[in-house]
Image (cartoon, rainbow, N blue to C red):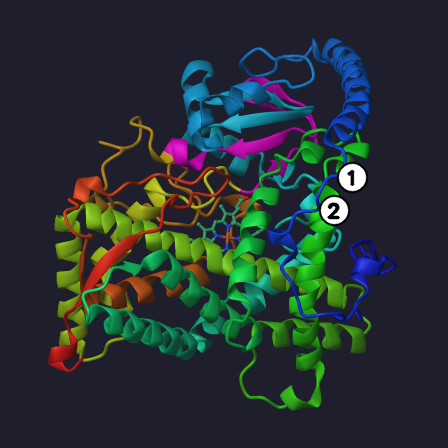
Amino acid sequence: MGHGLYGLQTSKRNNENVKHIGPAYTNPFLHHTPTKDPIMEATLWLLPIISLLVALFLVQKLLMKKSDKFRLPPGPSKLPVVGNLHQLAAKNMSPHHRLRELARVYGPIMHLRLGEVPTLVVSSADAAKEVLKNHDIRFANRPKLMVGKILFYNFSDIGLSPYGEYWRQLRKIATLELFTVKRVQSFRHVREEEVSKFIKSVASEAAFGSVVNLNDKLFGLLFNITSRIVFSREGEDQDAFRVFLSNLVDALAGFSIADLYPSIKLLESMSGFRKKLQEMIKESDRMLDPIIKDHLSKKRQGKAEEDLVDVLLRFQKENESTNMPFSLTTNNIKSVILEIFSAGSETSFSTVEWAMSELLRNPKVMERAQAEVRDVFKKKGIIGESSLNELKYLKLVIKETLRLHPIVPLLVRRESTEHCQIHGYDVPPKTRLMVNVWAIATDPQYWEEPEVFKPERFERSSIDYKGTNFEFIPFGSGRRMCPAIAFALANIELLLAMMLYHFDWKLPAGMRPNDLDMDESFGITIRRKNALCVIPMSYAFSSGM
Ligand code: HEM
């Protein structure tokens, strides 16, 4: 498939030469447009929506008749038009929690209809193996969510692009160029410098016995590391990016009204979702256009160290000059950068925050992990990445964190391309797939005391991150599994090791370990609802380390 399919070159918002002009930047997400006449507006909204819903109901009736001959998986009864949306929204629980509850009633292979979208929800290791291994190719596609169309330049990132030649080529660049172990190692000095700045900043607060908001500090750190790796700059506009990221995560969930009723194109504009995404792409262009321009300028030519934007531009140039059938437009490159940037900061930051939360709630585990880090670093006399391989227990702590808090608990949405049978049930084409990896990783069928944080459970186990042990697949499995595991672990391991080496950590006055809340914010990723606030006490500075 040619790249022309993926670039929206004709549209104004995707004009690669677009420049940010006009007055000083204001964050579009923090402003509301005042409505003129709410009653009139509501009436104008309702009439077409009701007619559309009635039409949709009739179409669904027809479709249901057609699908009678199928043996669909079990699931809760469906209401006209909304399907099972009301059951998913009930109890105000995050989707992965609610889906686990429903799976306990209807079984590990469950059929839902979310709006008009048929959805298969898989909640056991056996069933996950069936869809992600035995039928991997049939579920290797991604649904065409609006966010992919607008924000990722017509699905031209890695994660949302349809299964096909373009994705294959891009995935090859990802695994052979962007996320190789060698590339990850080449950024070691970036991670070490940024983590060292972070440690100093925490130490200065520790000197006063202050309570530190780890959420803010960790986000800032991961944002800086990712900015330097991707485009060799310290992160700018951190606050605006945080809001941007939060909107992006919501949009990726696929729960916007336009994504739930994809056949009603009018809903894209009526719901305001299209407008919001268009504002986001302007914001993204405002951040990325100068970066690309800067990388193309003479200034950067001949720089010894390639960042990820350089790698992508080099690939673009090489393919153009050799007339390869596959090449990348600048919009394609921006789309990949945006994806790496979002995935790179959010996932690692949340994992470290959950790991620290679990360690604070489990002082014995904290003690053992700290003893190991301090022992290894002191013996080797090196505090940094080269000692990480010896931190066996710390690696188990990270595994156990990802078991209880897999950051993408339902995996990134997939969609079936053809009819198939899963454990005797029919799954028609264009069925969306959610694999509840959190429900599987907390299932007593596979895990003893599944709700307890116990890194030792992995001590004599061969379970790894490669996606072949289906009771533990925080990075997914199969063709579309996360290509950046080494990239993610490099950040997480170094950061945690340094935090445990340099500080003892205490909860704010009067709080006992069990008082620390572990509430998740509502959404499609697993994030802490409340910031993690702790008191660091410097440990190692006196020993000159
Ligand atoms: C703790 C950290 C991370 C976790 C838990 C995680 C998890 C995941 C999961 C569950 C998927 C979907 C897999 C599937 O559909 O089977 C995914 C896909 C992806 N991840 Fe990660 N990820 C992490 C870090 C990262 C980082 C740091 C990057 C990039 C710098 C990244 C880039 C991607 C990309 C590009 C895809 C899409 C792959 C495709 O569709 O072919 N991830 N990740």
Coordinates of residue 87 in the picture (x, y in percent): 52, 19
User: For residue 53, which quarter of the picture?
Assistant: top right
Q: Are marks 2 and 1 in contact (CB under 8 Å)?
A: yes
Residue 52 highlighted magenta (yes or no): no
| Residue 132's disc number | none
| Residue 275's disc number | 2
Q: Is residue 149 above or below residue 175?
A: above
Of residues 179 and 237, the one nearer the viewer is 237
- Residue 156 is at least partly visible in this image: no
Coordinates of residue 381 in the picture (x, y in percent): 18, 80
Q: Secondary structure at mark 2?
A: helix
Q: Which residue is mark 1?
A: 269
* Real-space CA distance between mark 2 and mark 1, rounded to the nearest whole angstrom: 7 Å
Residue at 71% across / 34% down in the picture? Answer: 258
Q: Is residue 262 shown left or right of residue 359? A: right
* Dot 1 amino acid type: Ser
Q: Which residues are magenta?
A: 412-440
